[in-house]
Image (tube, rainbow, N blue to C red):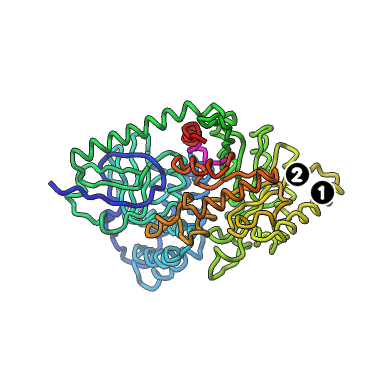
Amino acid sequence: MPEPLRLQGISASAGYAEGPLFDLDRVAAQYASKVTAADEKAALETAIGIATGRLATLIATSEGDAADILEFQVAMLEDDALTGPAFAAIAAGQPADAAWRQALDAEIAGYETSDQDYFRARGADMRDIRDQVLRALTEDGDIAVPAGAIFYGEDIAPTRFLETDWSSGGGIALKAGNTASHVAMLARSRGVPMVVGLGVVGLGASPADLAGAALLDAEHGGIVLAPSKAEIEAFRRSSLSFAARRDKAETYLAKPAVTKAGTAVRVQVNIADPSDVDGIDIATCDGVGLMRTEFLFGKTLPDEETQYRAYRKVLEWAGDKPVTIRTVDAGGDKPVPGFTVEENNPFLGLRGIRLSLARPQVFRVQIRALLRAAVHGNLKVMFPMIAVADEYARAVALFAEEQTALAARGIAQKMPPLGIMVEVPSVAIVPEAFADVAFFSIGSNDLTQYVMAAARDNASVAHLNSVRHPAVLRLIASVAAYGRAQQIPVSLCGDAGGEPTSIPALLEAGLRDLSVVPAQLAMAKAAIADASV
């Protein structure tokens, strides 16, 4: 019997899974070359049509982020700039499968070598597109996946995730991948255990290691292959403990969040798409602490009416509870065609509020939509990537100008409270420079990365990227203290707010307002109830 093989990666979605491994990297069936170039061209056209049809079927049963991912893939398959090189290679004598793989691999290489989350996530989309068409070319029938299987391999395609029935359990263990990928996002929203960054050594193990059940501990970011009886028993105890904590947490969902000492804590939700609120009972949360608006800027620049309708939907859902909408945080790992610019170091470049101020014609459209939507609920607006007070002042001036213009035209509007994200260390170090803001919202993801100079999706430096590091907590505490002294509300809307292990430290730092992804709402409230603050 092979020795147990223990691997450590990064948790992308907490949970436990025990089951057989399914090889995502299995060798596909061979393509049967055609006689003429015309036949090869026809074969590729047919395969692209089949792949597009499969995606359309998935889109019909998807919404929100999942639908956006699939629509991006369809748009790419319909783009001559992507398919053209493959057809040119066929005309030069290559078979359809080689031509398609060569064309897509060239595209994928550009994405995968990027140090930016967004491009690596799109790299997974491009691999998915490549493999969908190759699958159609080879007429490769799907091998049945055992119920409750743990998918393992280099990475997993978004379509594979969306096609899978997760109701029987199962999980995902990846050699590569990252916590910011589309699949990681989907896994967190659906409660599917997922670990990334396991490396090539372990999952390049022998067939004997991979033959039996594996134990995926996505709470702590590990997996055990060929586990011993003792390890299986210990794993099941941990899994039962996690399930019990999760079930107990559900009892807190409909209650206000309060610590053991009776201290009230506001718990809001983060959303990325208006459709996210369709599955949330407003009674279970204190409002929306972060509504991202990048989803509107994915393919084309959105017009005012499109934005207005999206913002109004969420405001009307929330009723009198606050909805904090962040102005478009494009740039860095979120490029937008026709808006963002290419830079050598985009994370330290023209992104967030810097980009909005540099493109006022685009920013003003969003401002008008927000001002109009504000009459439909309790809106708050915050600006991302603020570094100096002048940026806030300029953004506020634009809001004032657009409000005056709307009023002159007799259009209903309302000026919402205007606040800022605290994610650039300069703000956290000198919050007194922003005494006139309406509120602070701490973006723990970027603040931690910038303070520790360690990417949160990089396994080799994951030990450095922790919101619980004293340097990060000291900055959070100083902002919270300044807010209390000046009566400026302070909240936190980064991933740390939904981490049960981080919540006690955040409360000790003085925070009393957290915003989490909806799937983490119950566990966050339970962690608050267990805290002694």
514 or 292, which is in the foreground? Answer: 514
| Residue farthest toward the bottom in the current orientation of the protein | 92
Task: Sort mark 1 into few (<14), some (14-19) or many (20+) by Cα contacts within 10 Å.
Answer: some
C-alpha span from label 2 to label 1: 9 Å
The type of residue carrying mark 2 is Arg
Find residue 7 and report its horizontal and vertical position in percent: 28, 51
Q: Is residue 519 magenta?
A: yes
Residue sitting at x 57%, y 45%: 492
Image-quadrant location for residue 262: top right
Q: Specify the label residue 5 is tagged with.
A: none
Residue sitting at x 66%, y 49%: 382
Q: Specify the label residue 406 is tagged with.
A: 1
Label 1 near label 2: C-beta < 8 Å? yes
Task: Confirm whether residue 47 shows in the render.
Answer: no
Task: Sort mark 2 into few (<14), some (14-19) or many (20+) by Cα contacts within 10 Å.
Answer: many
Find residue 292 and report its horizontal and vertical position in percent: 60, 48
Q: Is residue 290 left or right of residue 449?
A: right
260 or 529, which is in the foreground? Answer: 260
Find residue 244 and report its horizontal and vertical position in percent: 37, 29
When the figure is inspected, residue 437 is found, relative to residue 248, above or below; the finding is below
Find residue 203 and report its horizontal and vertical position in percent: 26, 54
When the figure is inspected, residue 201 is found, relative to residue 515, above or below; the finding is below
Q: Is residue 193 left or right of residue 420?
A: left
Q: Secondary structure at mark 1?
A: helix
Task: Confirm whether residue 462 shows in the render.
Answer: yes
Magenta segment range? 514-521
Q: Specify the label residue 372 is tagged with.
A: 2
Q: Is residue 447 magenta?
A: no
The type of residue carrying mark 1 is Leu
Count of numbered tags: 2
Residue sitting at x 60%, y 50%: 478
Q: Of the residues under marks 2 and 1, which one precedes in the sequence?
A: 2
